[in-house]
Image (cartoon, helix red, strand yellow):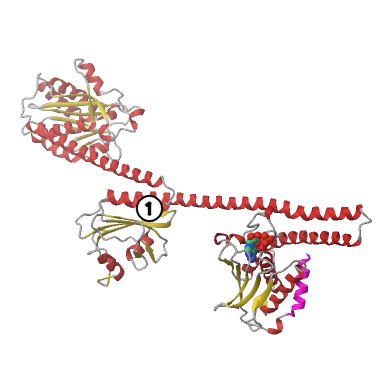
């Protein structure tokens, strides 16, 4: 059974002089409770009480009150749209379950009609328009309708509601008829003549309670707003920078001040770090600084706990927290930290990004401060820690980008060098060869001696070209790992001799500086690939001769470095290297004066090849120089053989052949 008409409309039609008004849900709750309390406070008068709830759940909150009201009168009716087990029932009071499609489900009614006291509240919920949806909470739901003490209106409302009840519960016809008789009897015009005290008192109490609720809500909104403003200001301050140091500085200062702590620390760390150096700190006046100190993490149970749980730990009082104690005794480093730095309360919040621990924010209250951190403050620190994480990731990404940029710039320099070198180093010998061959073919009467010179120049330049191409190929093989190492125990001195004779043979037309070797033949055997080792030695010796005047000297020496290596050094008295160039000389195509202004020939690949070979053989290579015109030293290390078998070492001659064969590839 359903009834689609609204009780409010029926009432307004019956009594056109009535004007409906808007009520918030909170006001209707206050009024209803005050009306019910008036019934509960009344004695002797047995009123008719009809309450219609929109849903069973609203009735449930009041069910106990209605049991007490039913003690006062047997004419109590409660209506609601059932949700679980609300049904038509005659108990201490009558319950009437109406269909959820009934217009009653949109309305809120309470009628109290006694001889001394009459009041009614007949309201209908106003639909919320879309713009209001987000703003609306339960308490601000709005209703329109009538609330009055006017007896005639109350009687009419009671009669209308009793008709609705009768439609749902026809078996109550007799009881309802009795109620209607009472209505006729009570239908005298005018207002109540009872003491309005209980009603007013209750109303004021409910209004007060409502006001307190509002105040609380305002306070929590204000706190939330304050927190958001703080997070925003810190966040924008740290996001403005891409430098981790700056981010850390701003964050500790802002956080320390905002939370009025004694000390705020912020440091980078990983899960496995054992200690950190404190570099960023906020200090309240008079607090002992930690800046520059080494802060133990490994033995700090607080840190270990944070690493494990990956969430904040807050110790409101370091003197009573049991897990800082082991067997009833404070764990030494933690208690040391607590007493040395006077930490009375200790908060540690991890800075985490994608489950990676990036750092820690620590807040300390010192000297028995009697303040405790509340949940909102703890959440705030956590929010800021996560912002720091994001800012750090951004800074890291920026640093990576910068590094990438530098690599790109280096690559670009290499490319330009490559073009310049190929332009110069390939074109120059080619032109010489071309001129020589053209002259030889166009001038058959050329004297034999001149022919000889022409042929030698063409041959020398062809050799230069071959060397350049070979260096390109060698480096490319080494860099792409296409090289097979044949490592075996070898006497270093033989490799040095071989390299020296190669250099002398290659540079036989040039005026060389004096070369001397200090490599003793009783050095331990080295574990290496002889061909490649000779290549390194030859290149270093070539360079030393190339960049040293013929009046200067070149010296090669070798000695064990006290570990498992032999250190070989090629020293010259030549033009030297500026200190800031000592690393880059090993880069591909690095040439100090640029390819086009070169006096000595070369490809800028020699040292890059040497570095690849030495690393491939398990050693290190580096350059030393006191600067321009102060000579240079090139050092490299070769592993000492652990199990030297002299008989395995091949005679130097066959190695010379092997080197030459590979040289002709
Ligand atoms: P290049 O074919 O130009 O010699 P390298 O890779 O062998 O190429 O050397 C790169 C650069 O390092 C040289 O151009 C030179 O500027 C510098 N260099 C190498 N060896 C020496 C040295 N013994 N003394 C001074 N400068 C050197």
The stretch of residues the image draws in magenta is 650-664
Q: Is residue 358 left or right of residue 373?
A: right
Residue 73 seen anywhere in this rendered image of the structure: no
Q: Which residue is drawn at 12% across and 33% down?
A: 204
Would you say the magenta stretch is mainly helix, strand or loop? helix
- Front residue of 266/112: it is 266
Q: How crowded is mark 1: few (under 14 residues within 10 Å), some or many (20 or more)?
A: many
In the picture, measured across the screen, residue 565 lies left or right of residue 209, that is right
Rendered view: 411 above or below 485: above
Measured from the top left, where is residue 70 in percent x and y?
14, 36
| Viewer-side residue, 211 vs 234 | 234
Q: Find ligand 1 in the image and state its quadrant.
A: bottom right
Q: Where is residue 498 in the image (x, y as percent from the top left)?
A: 72, 75
> Is residue 359 among what the camera can see?
yes
Q: Is mark 1 within 8 Å of ligand 1?
A: no
Numbered circles on residues, count: 1
Q: In this view, does 291 lie above or below 174?
A: below
Seen from the viewer's position, the closer of residues 490 and 314 is: 490
Residue 305 figure quarter:
bottom left
Is residue 651 one of those drawn in magenta? Answer: yes
The image shows residue 439, relative to residue 523, as above or below, that is above
Q: Where is residue 259 in the image (x, y as percent from the top left)?
A: 27, 50
The C terminus, quarter of image: bottom right
Magenta includes 109? Answer: no
What secondary structure is marked by label 1?
Answer: helix
Quarter of the figure with residue 114:
top left
The quadrant the N terminus occupies is top left
| Residue to which mark 1 is pinned | 248
Q: Where is residue 600 in the image (x, y as percent from the top left)?
A: 70, 60
Left or right: residue 429 compared with residue 149: right
Residue at left 64%, top 77%?
527
Based on the displayed image, in which of its 4 quarters is residue 502 positioned? bottom right
């Amino acid at each position: 059974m359903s009834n689609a008409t609204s009780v409010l409309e029926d009432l307004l039609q019956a009594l056109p002089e009535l004007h409906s008004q808007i009520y918030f849900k909170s006001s209707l709750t206050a009024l209803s409770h005050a009306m019910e309390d008036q019934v509960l406070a009344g004695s002797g008068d047995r009123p008719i009480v009809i309450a219609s709830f929109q849903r069973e759940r609203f009735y449930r909150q009041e069910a106990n009150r209605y049991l007490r009201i039913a003690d006062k009168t047997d004419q109590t009716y409660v209506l609601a749209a059932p949700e679980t087990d609300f049904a038509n029932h005659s108990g201490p009071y009558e319950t009437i379950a109406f269909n959820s499609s009934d217009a009653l489900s949109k309305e809120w009614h309470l009628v109290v009609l006694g001889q001394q006291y009459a009041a009614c509240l007949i309201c209908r919920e106003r639909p919320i328009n879309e713009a209001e949806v987000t703003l609306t909470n339960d308490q601000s739901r709005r209703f329109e309708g009538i609330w009055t003490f006017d007896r005639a209106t109350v009687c009419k409302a009671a009669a209308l509601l009793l008709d609705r009840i009768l439609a749902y519960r026809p078996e109550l016809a007799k009881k309802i008829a009795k109620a209607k008789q009472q209505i006729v009897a009570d239908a005298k015009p005018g207002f109540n003549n009872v003491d309005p005290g209980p009603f007013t008192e209750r109303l004021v109490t409910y209004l007060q309670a409502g006001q307190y609720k509002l105040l609380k809500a305002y306070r929590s909104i204000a706190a939330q707003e304050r927190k958001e403003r703080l997070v925003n200001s810190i966040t924008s301050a740290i996001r403005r920078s891409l430098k981790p140091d700056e981010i850390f500085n701003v964050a500790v200062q802002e956080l320390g001040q905002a939370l009025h702590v004694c000390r705020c620390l912020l440091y980078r760390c990983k899960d496995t770090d054992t200690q950190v150096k404190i570099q960023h700190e906020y200090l309240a006046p008079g607090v002992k600084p930690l800046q520059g100190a080494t802060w133990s993490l490994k033995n700090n149970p607080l840190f270990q706990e944070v690493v494990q749980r990956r969430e904040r730990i807050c110790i409101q009082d370091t003197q009573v927290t049991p897990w800082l104690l082991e067997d009833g005794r404070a764990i030494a480093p933690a208690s040391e930290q607590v007493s040395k730095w006077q930490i009375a309360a200790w908060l540690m919040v991890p800075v985490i990004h994608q489950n990676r621990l990036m750092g820690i924010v620590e807040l300390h209250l010192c000297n028995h401060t009697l303040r405790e951190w509340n949940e909102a403050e703890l959440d705030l620190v956590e929010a800021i820690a996560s912002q720091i994480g994001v800012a750090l990731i951004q800074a890291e990404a920026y640093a990576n980008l910068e590094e990438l940029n530098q690599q790109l710039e280096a690559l670009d320099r290499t490319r330009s060098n490559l073009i310049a070198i190929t332009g110069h180093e390939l074109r120059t010998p080619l032109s010489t060869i071309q001129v020589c061959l053209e002259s030889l073919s166009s001038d058959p009467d050329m004297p034999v001696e001149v022919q000889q010179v022409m042929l030698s120049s063409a041959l020398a330049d062809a050799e230069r070209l071959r060397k350049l191409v070979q260096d390109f190929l060698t480096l490319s093989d080494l860099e792409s790992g296409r090289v097979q190492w044949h490592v075996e125990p070898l006497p270093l001195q033989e490799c040095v001799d071989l390299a020296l004779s190669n250099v002398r043979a290659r540079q036989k037309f040039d005026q060389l500086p004096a070369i001397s070797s200090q490599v003793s033949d009783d050095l331990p055997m080295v574990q290496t690939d002889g061909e490649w080792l000779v290549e390194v030695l030859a290149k270093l010796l070539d360079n030393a001769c190339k960049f040293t005047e013929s009046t200067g000297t070149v010296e090669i020496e070798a000695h064990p470095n006290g570990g498992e290596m032999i250190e070989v050094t090629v020293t010259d008295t030549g033009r030297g290297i500026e200190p800031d160039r000592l690393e880059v000389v090993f880069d591909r195509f690095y040439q100090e004066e640029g390819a086009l202004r070169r006096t000595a020939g070369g490809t800028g690949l020699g040292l890059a090849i040497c570095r690849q070979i030495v690393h491939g053989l398990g050693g290190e290579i580096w350059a030393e120089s006191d600067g321009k015109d102060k000579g240079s030293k090139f050092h490299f290390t070769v592993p000492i053989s652990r199990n030297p078998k002299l008989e395995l070492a091949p005679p130097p001659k066959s190695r010379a052949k092997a080197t030459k064969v590979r040289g002709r590839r």
